[in-house]
Image: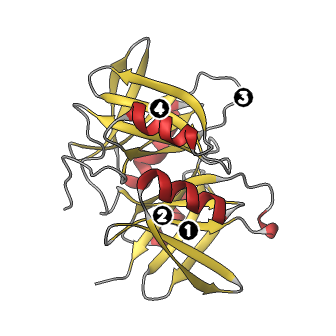
Amino acid sequence: MTEKTSYEAGTFCWTDLGTSNTAAAKKFYGEVFGWKAVDVPAGPGVYTMLQKGDKDVCALYALTEQGVPPHWLSYIAVKSADEATKKAESLGAKIRKAPFDVMDAGRMSVVEDPTGATFALWESKKHAGSRLIREAGTMCWNELMTKDVDKAGGFYSKLFGWGSKTMDVGGGEKYTMFQKGSEDAAGMMAIGKDWGPVPPNWLVYFAVDSCDASVKKATAAGAKVTVQPTDIPNTGRFAVLVDPQGATFGIFQSTRK
């Protein structure tokens, strides 16, 4: 069990789902990951904590903005949401939501990077982020899909101090590993011309014990598969799915001992 009570600045700490049907989403993700849904009053609405056991691992809420499709949003920990937001804007980002307080949980903003991918900045107060990570049914990885890896790489390196290393993964494709100190922080790859109308985005992955069994369970519950279970040599097996409301997420089965 990897339990967390705090996150270092520049690391992914939380993810939540904005959805068009909260009841259906609770049912779907409960069937796929075994999450328990706990509704928490949040201003005029409700914020639903999704728990593994009694630990908050992510959340969902009802979308209210017109034209915004269901989506998972990845949060990155910062010391100051205001300062990090100002820095992001100076580096060419668009600020979708200026810094605001989330009751006594923390302070956040929503940022669109210079290539079009959206993420959140999180300054924790009473809520540090996911209490469990990198185990079955919890967030284990975040990956940037972008049409300009050079521009995106420069932006995130300057904003968070991430280092990077790029490797060939076959078929002429390259994969960039962002690093925070000696730890892998996130991944990045270019959106292929043959992918269709895929917008720049941050994709969140949840760990599973069996990629194939989880895909079978998810499709039985109404999901669509956009990337079939695929092996990553000496690393693991992954798939990418779209939930019944249209939000995309990944699953990952580690084969590392």
* CB-based contact (under 8 Å), mark 2 and mark 1: yes
- The CA span between labels 4 and 2 is 26 Å
On the image, the x and y values in percent for residue 218 come to 53, 57
* CB-based contact (under 8 Å), mark 4 and mark 2: no
Q: Secondary structure at mark 1?
A: strand
Which label sits in the foreground, 3 or 1? 3
Q: Dot 3, how many residues are within 10 Å of its Cα: few (below 14), some (14-19), or many (20+)?
A: few
Which mark identifies residue 251?
2
Q: Residue at x 48, y 71 (%)?
A: 164
Q: Dot 4, how many residues are within 10 Å of its Cα: few (below 14), some (14-19), or many (20+)?
A: many
Q: Which label's residue is closer to the chain start, 4 or 2?
A: 4
Which residue lies under the disc numbered 1?
A: 239
- The CA span between labels 4 and 1 is 30 Å
Look at label 4 and name its amino acid. Answer: Ser
Which mark identifies residue 109?
4
For the N terminus, the quadrant is bottom left
Look at label 2 and name its amino acid. Answer: Ile
Q: Which label's residue is closer to the chain start, 3 or 1?
A: 3
Q: Residue at x 56, y 53 (%)?
A: 202
On the image, the x and y values in percent for residue 174 come to 63, 79
Look at label 1 and name its amino acid. Answer: Ala
Which label sits in the foreground, 2 or 3? 3
